[in-house]
Amino acid sequence: MNILNRIFDSVDHILIIIAKLLLLAMVIIVSTNVFMRYVLNSGIRWAEEISLVCVVWFTFIALAHGVKEKLHIKMNLLPASIIRKFYKFFIISSNIIIFIVGYTMIYYGIKLVEVTSRSILPASNLPAAVLYFPLILSGMLIIFNIIIDFLRLYRHREV
């Protein structure tokens, strides 16, 4: 499992670098387009489309990383004494719900990619599926993160 963790940490690190580059590209494209539109009176035709692709990819990569780092929203509705007693139950329930969300992202992401692979984005001529593929990738990463978390919980239970 240690090797698996290192491999996945490397993949996660690469995806974070890609997300940072996408965010940088989006800022540069939008800034350049604003400058060209308001100063030079001509914009970049494909700027909005490519920046939309960048933000979609960035969002779904960040979503998968957020699940790995447990950055998702938590609600503290119950007193701390109850939470300590049922801590593992809450963790497992949360993981099951997140697993279902990841599976749903993969299932419907595949359907969206299949449907949109036949059309293209008008300004950039990219396949429209490029907007929906990160849904599949993010769902797979979420499921993998949850499986790793389940294995950690199981290993701590046996100790």
Image (cartoon, grey):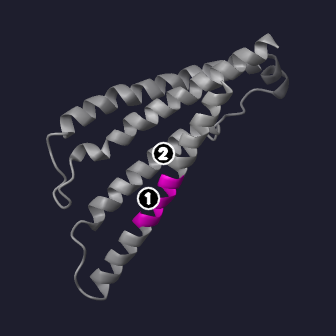
Residue at position x 30%, y 84% from top? Answer: 38
Nearest the eye: 7 or 101: 7
**In the rendered view, would you say 116 is above or below 84?**
below
Which amino acid is tagged 1?
Answer: Leu
- The question of residue 15 being in magenta is answered with no
The residue segment tinted magenta is 17-26
Residue found 26% across the figure and 88% down from its top: 40
Furthest-right residue in view? Answer: 81
Give the image location of residue 85, x and y in percent.
81, 17
Q: Is residue 55 left or right of residue 62?
A: left
Mark 2 or 1, nearer chain start: 1
In the image, 137 versus 43, the foreground residue is 137
- Label 2: how many residues lie within 10 Å, few (<14), some (14-19) or many (20+)? many
Query: Does 4 sit above or below residue 27?
Result: above
Residue 86 placed where, x, y %?
76, 17
Majority secondary structure in the magenta region: helix
Give residue 10's quadrant in the image: top right
Q: Is residue 16 left or right of residue 91?
A: left
**Quarter of the view holding residue 22:** bottom left
Please identify the quadrant where the N terminus is shown. Answer: top right
Residues marked 2 and 1 touching at CB (< 8 Å): yes
Q: Is residue 86 above or below residue 126?
A: above
Q: Residue at x 36, y 70 (%)?
A: 29
Q: Is residue 24 magenta?
A: yes
Asked whether residue 13 is in view, the answer is yes
Q: In the rendered image, is residue 72 in sight?
A: no
Please indicate whether residue 23 sits to the left or right of residue 74 in the image.
Answer: left
| Amino acid type of the residue tagged 2 in the rendering | Ile
Q: Which disc, if any, is residue 22?
A: 1
Horizontal and vertical percent for residue 43?
A: 24, 77
Considering the numbered disc 2 on the image, is that residue within a helix, a strand or a loop?
helix
Q: Give the residue number, with chain letter if any, for mark 2.
A: 61
